Image: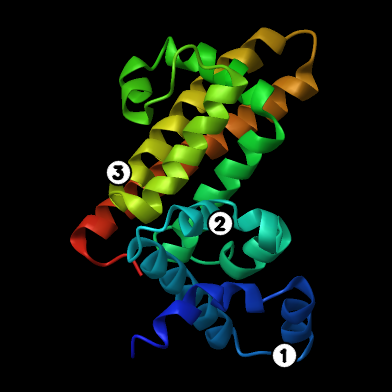
Amino acid sequence: MTDEEEPRRPRRPAMFSPGALDAQASSGVDPAEVSAIAHETAAVLVGRGRATDDPELTRRLVSLVDELGMATVAELWAGRPAVSLPGALWRLYAIHESVRRDAVGAAADYDLGRQLADVQHVIAGAAEPPSPEALRDLVDAILTGVFDGDLAVALERAAAFCRIISVGRAHRADERDGHDERGAGEATRSAAALLDTAGDLERAASAWRAGNLD
């Protein structure tokens, strides 16, 4: 690749609008091609982000959902294996977006969970106290670390964050038992899913360190 070609690469994911993806699906695109697109776009995104010191580019990559939309990001990466670069990116962006959408709820779960998972709190690195604003800053910092820090550390921080939220959510579910069974059940399932996500992210971090997260 030449120096002249390199600056164009970070724009590649923007080619895949929801309409374009729908057209691909309806035209019977080979699943192997869809997988290749997912892995290529993830590699381009991370590679370009880590190859530059441009804070504006990093900001745009962190805010990728604002440009593409969550549906497009999901179409690109949600179906990939958990321990893969697109699978890990999907989980990171989903965590980031969930906190942006409900920072108050995330802060409440985190505040309770950190009291019972203090080691994970240190790994996640949230500010004190864990206000909604601090939680937004934390997920911004974790996603920023993908592009200008140690990607494995970013994945481990995200995993710790998920474990803390899971603990808090599970205890809040217990508080609903007996008077809000539906809410308690939903919270319990969500807490379990977060634990699964944490494990996925930890395995992805190990794979990145071993040089085989692709």
Identified by mark 3, the residue type is Val
Q: Residue furthest left?
A: 210
Identified by mark 1, the residue type is Gly
Is residue 198 at least partly visible in the picture?
yes
Residue that carries the numbered disc 3 in the rendered image: 153
- Image spot of residue 98 (x, y percent): 64, 39
Q: Secondary structure at mark 2?
A: helix
Q: Is 125 above or below relative to 151?
A: above
Tell me: 49 left or right of 205. Answer: right
Identified by mark 2, the residue type is Arg
Q: Tell me what residue is drawn at x 45 percent, y 13 percent.
A: 128
Mark 1 or mark 3, which has the lower sequence index? Answer: 1
State the residue in front, 61 or 38.
Answer: 61
Tell me: 101 left or right of 33. Answer: right
State the residue in front, 51 or 84.
Answer: 51
> Of the residues tagged 1 and 2, which is closer to the observer?
2
Colouring method of the image: rainbow
State the quadrant of the C terminus.
bottom left
User: Where on the picture, by quarter, is residue 122?
Assistant: top left
Residue that carries the numbered disc 2 in the rendered image: 60
Mark 1: few, some, or many residues within 10 Å (few <14, many ≥20)?
few
Answer yes or no: do the residues labelled 1 and 2 have beta carbons within 8 Å? no
